[in-house]
Structures are given as structure tokens and as C-alpha cells.
Amino acid sequence: MRHGNVVHLFSKGQTMKIYKDIYEFAASAGAFEGYVYQGGKADASYLPRWVDHLVERYQKLPREVQEEIQPQCDGTLGRAIRSLVPVLGDNNDVIQRLRVLVKGELPSSPDDFSR
């Protein structure tokens, strides 16, 4: 996100909250990707609640912020999806809820960092 745009879109107090919201979403998304990487030893019982929190945090971000971070979100959560599909299956509820957050194409694999 470009700092200049945020300052023009939001007041100072709103800007500080948006930075916090972006950080919390990004930290959770990155931790999620690492937790499920290549199926790992992830405890599937944690996944539904974690995904619910990711969706909730993403939806609370202003549309302008969502648009700005979408390519990175597509990469991070797309790689997580690629890690989970072999374990959970493509039609699993967790996978379907994660796909709502990915607007572009999925990365080719959990190791695709080309974006």
C-alpha cells in the first residue's frame, strides 16, 4: 500500500487503525500459510476457525485496501490452498471459504513465489 493514498483516504485515527488491521490480517494469513505448508502436520480442527477469522479480517478492510493487497493475498492464501487441497480435497468447506479471498489465479504450487 502506498502511504500517500492512505493519508488522503482516511483521517489520522482511521489510518492508524487500518495499519493495525492490515498487519493483523497479513500476520494471520502468513502464519496460516506456514502452518499448512505442504500439508505439514497441521491439525485440521484449527482450520475452520482460523479461516473464519481470516475472512472476517479481510472483509473489515476498506475496499481500497483490499484492492491494493489483493495480489499478495492471492499468492499467500493461494499457496495455502495448494498445500491443503491434497489433504482436504477441493470441495472441503475450508478450501471453499479460502477461495473467496483469492480473486486471481491460484499459484501453481505451494512453492510458487513468482508473484
Image: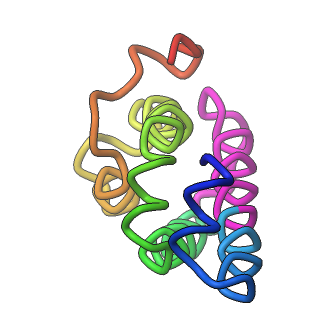
Assign the magenta stretch its main secondary structure: helix
Find out whether residue 38 is within the magenta segment: yes
Q: Residue at x 64, y 67 (%)?
A: 7
Residue 93 percent across, percent down from the top left: 31, 63
Residue 7, above or below 41: below
Q: Which residue is drawn at 46% across and 16% down?
A: 109
Residue 31 percent across, percent down from the top left: 75, 50
Residues in magenta? 23-44
Q: From this viewpoint, is residue 48 visible?
A: no
Q: Residue at x 53, y 11 (%)?
A: 114
The extreme left residue here reads: 91
Residue 111 percent across, percent down from the top left: 59, 15
The extreme bottom residue here reads: 13
Res 20 → quadrant: bottom right
In front of the other: 91 or 112: 112
In front of the other: 11 or 39: 11
Q: From this viewpoint, is residue 69 visible?
A: yes
Left or right of 99, for residue 110:
right
Left or right of 24, for residue 38:
left
Residue 54 percent across, percent down from the top left: 54, 67
Q: Which residue is drawn at 41% across and 45% down?
A: 88
